[in-house]
Image (cartoon, rainbow, N blue to C red):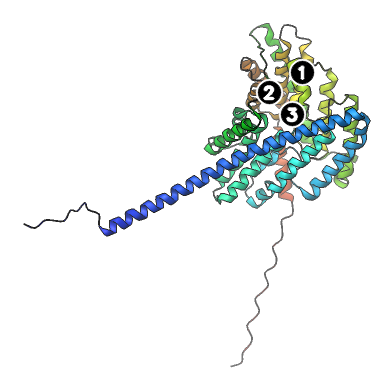
Amino acid sequence: MTDRPDMRAPTPLRRKHRILHLRRSARTTTTQWRRTLTIWLGAVLVGVVAVIFAIAADWAARERSRMIHWNPWVMLAVIPAGLALSTWLTRNFFKGAQGSGIPQTIATLHIENFAIVDRVLALRIAFGKIVLTTFGLLVGASIGREGPTVQVGAAIMHTFSRFLGQSQISAKRGMILAGGAAGVSAAFNTPLAGIVFAIEELSHSFEQRTSGTMLTGVVLSGVTAIALVGNYTYFGHTDVDVPLGIAWIAVLTCGIVGGVAGGTFSAILIRASRGLPGLAGRLIMNHPVAFAALCGLVLAIIGIASHGATYGTGYTQARAIISGTEHYPASFFVLKFIATIVSYCSGIPGGLFAPSLAIGAGIGGWVAQFLPHTTAGAVVLLGTVAYFSAVVQAPLTATVIVMEMCDNQQVTLALLATSFLAFGVSRMICANPLYGALADRFLETVDKAPQPVPAPVPASPAPPHTST
């Protein structure tokens, strides 16, 4: 009886198929790891750039304080010249860098033509955003760096997306979303706020909301920021509470006052984005640099009237109000309100987050003197979250940002109630969310922009006539 061959023994053909399968698996694994490491590197870079941006903004604030200490009247020349130069540079070299940066990021999540997205989120525009925002803070504009950091983060992650050669639209948008969320996380050192902001404000689809890329970007950028500057809280630690009972009168008061103020602010900016009527509108259209200089003169007058309190982000004033070390009159938040609107209308790059927090803190500090049954520090936090929520119309984001920035979970329920009340009041005044409306306006501008006309294709020469 002859032995039969073992059918389980690999034949040469089976061995070849197994080797090919292993090679394909190895290539797939290598590609996945390369993609993952590239995303990680992009998120870390967002954190590094956000920290550098913050250091530059702090330097600008110190240098501006030195100028004011030397002679406060010098701002009558510095701010008009500075805003005029910033507007000229933006319009001639960094088109797309103007404004907050958040509307542009939202718009890129809806633009189908990725050639336009490539221009809006180019690294050159991101660089201009950082430089010109820092310059605006140096000369005294009432702007912040947090909104611009969102566009910078989105630009960095979009660049890495192009490097990976991603072709799926959902994957590209997921990287943009991750960059924007990472920018918020690193700018405020508030990782949870970055996630909530991406879900509530930037994202509008379930797939993007559940993106693991976004979570990875937020965590890594936040960890990078902590590694570079330490585990700090934006406004320090506050230990205040709003117990249920009569103290909740502050919730109603701040929610209504902050909602009215924030809704009015948003309505004014949305109206301004569509163009101002009359002489102002013609001046902006025909002489934008001169109009920016005029805005600078108004900012200088406001700054002198407020003894310099309205210049810059307002971070120092907000932190002092929240900690209770300084008390500002109602004129502070009124003048800061006006200064922020004027700064935005000038057309220079700069965000609205930090000035809004300062205005809200000013409102809370003013309201606190009329509410003796509630701790003053708690009322300030409620005023801050109310105004901020009313401006951005994103109540969850506002609550989480203020909660994380002050390292206080005791007051979370009161913050939520105030934030949602202010959101409702703001919607009655301004039906459209600010950033969404500005993003729509940006999309309209993109649609109306002249598209490059392709070069005509030369007609192929007729074949020479040959006689038979």
**Measured from the top left, where is residue 21 in percent x and y?**
36, 52
417 and 318: which is toward the camera: 318
Q: In which quarter of the image is residue 53?
A: top right
**Measured from the top left, where is residue 93 in percent x and y?**
78, 50
Which quadrant, please, contains the N terminus?
Answer: bottom left
| Label 2 crowd (10 A; few <14 / some 14-19 / many >=20) | many
Q: In whole angstroms, how far apart are the C-alphas of marks 2 and 1?
A: 26 Å
Q: Name the residue under label 2.
A: 424
**Tag 1 secondary structure:** helix
**Tag 2 secondary structure:** helix
Q: In this view, does 22 lie above or below 274?
A: below
Counting residues from the start of the chain, the first of labels 3 and 2 encountered is 3
Tell me if 437 is positioned left or right of 167 in this view.
right
Q: Quadrant of residue 77?
A: top right
The dot on residue 420 is: none
Q: Mark 1 points at which residue?
A: 321
| Label 3 crowd (10 A; few <14 / some 14-19 / many >=20) | many
In the rendered structure, which amino acid carries the disc numbered 1? Ile
Which quadrant, please, contains the C terminus?
Answer: bottom right
Q: Name the residue under label 3.
A: 354
Q: In whole angstroms, how far apart are the C-alphas of marks 3 and 1?
A: 14 Å
Counting residues from the start of the chain, the first of labels 2 and 1 encountered is 1
134 and 397: which is toward the camera: 134
Q: Are marks 3 and 1 in contact (CB under 8 Å)?
A: no
x 88%, y 46%: residue: 287
**Measured from the top left, where is residue 426 in percent x and y?**
72, 25
